[in-house]
Amino acid sequence: MFIIAATTSVILTSVIIADSYYGPLGASDAVYIARRYASGFIEAANAKTLLESAMLICFSVSWPFKIRKLVTVKRSVGLSHGFLLMIITGYSCGIMAKILPIYYGESVNYFLASLYIVNLSMVVAVLALSIRYQIVNKVAACEILA
């Protein structure tokens, strides 16, 4: 848990470092950002970016645990491929939302786009492993019955 909090703090601090007026973030980053936003020290766009970064970092930290569990157990019981496809669709839409401003000549947040891409690649890996182990388990079950 400490690693997740430390990673989130480091990333959020690096996002804010460009404007040293905000200062370093505390232990509860989301509450800190919300308080700074309410008091007018952080603009709405910056607060949304920071909170979206924290969300994506938390997901980035959690997906490798799912991949490790799949590789260790070698079974895809309880995984819905439809649900994973919906997550993949959501991350794809997030990537497009972050990159689409190029078309309009606006600035692009490449940091958030890269977080979406990392998360998307991990979900695709989970889906691929799930399909692979599902096929392997079905073949093994057929061999046992034969």
Image (tube, grey):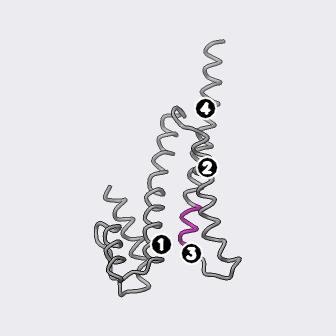
Compute the Cα span from label 3 to label 4.
38 Å
Element class at badge 3: loop
Badge number at residue 49: 1
Tell me which numbered mark, 3 or 4, is placed earlier along the sequence: 3
Percent position of residue 135, x then y = 65, 31
Give the left or right position of residue 25, taking residue 143 as reference: left
Looking at the picture, which amino acid does disc 3 mark?
A: Asn
| Residue at left offset 31%, top offset 74% | 35
Q: CA distance from mark 2 to mark 4?
A: 15 Å
Q: Nearer the viewer, mark 3 or mark 2?
A: 3
Q: CA distance from mark 1 to mark 3?
A: 9 Å
Residue 101's quadrant in the figure? bottom right
Q: Which residues are magenta?
A: 110-117
Residue 126's image quarter?
top right
Rounded to the nearest whole Å, what is the CA distance between mark 1 and mark 2?
A: 25 Å
Going by the image, does 13 lie left or right of 74?
left
The residue located at (67%, 77%) in the rendering is 102
The residue identified by callout 3 is 109
* Disc nearer the start of the sequence (1/2): 1
Viewer-proximal residue, 63 or 83? Answer: 83
Q: Secondary structure at mark 1?
A: helix
Q: Amino acid at mark 4?
A: Gln
Task: Give me the disc on residue 124.
Answer: 2
Was residue 113 drawn as part of the magenta stretch in this picture? yes
Q: x, y percentage for residue 90?
A: 59, 55
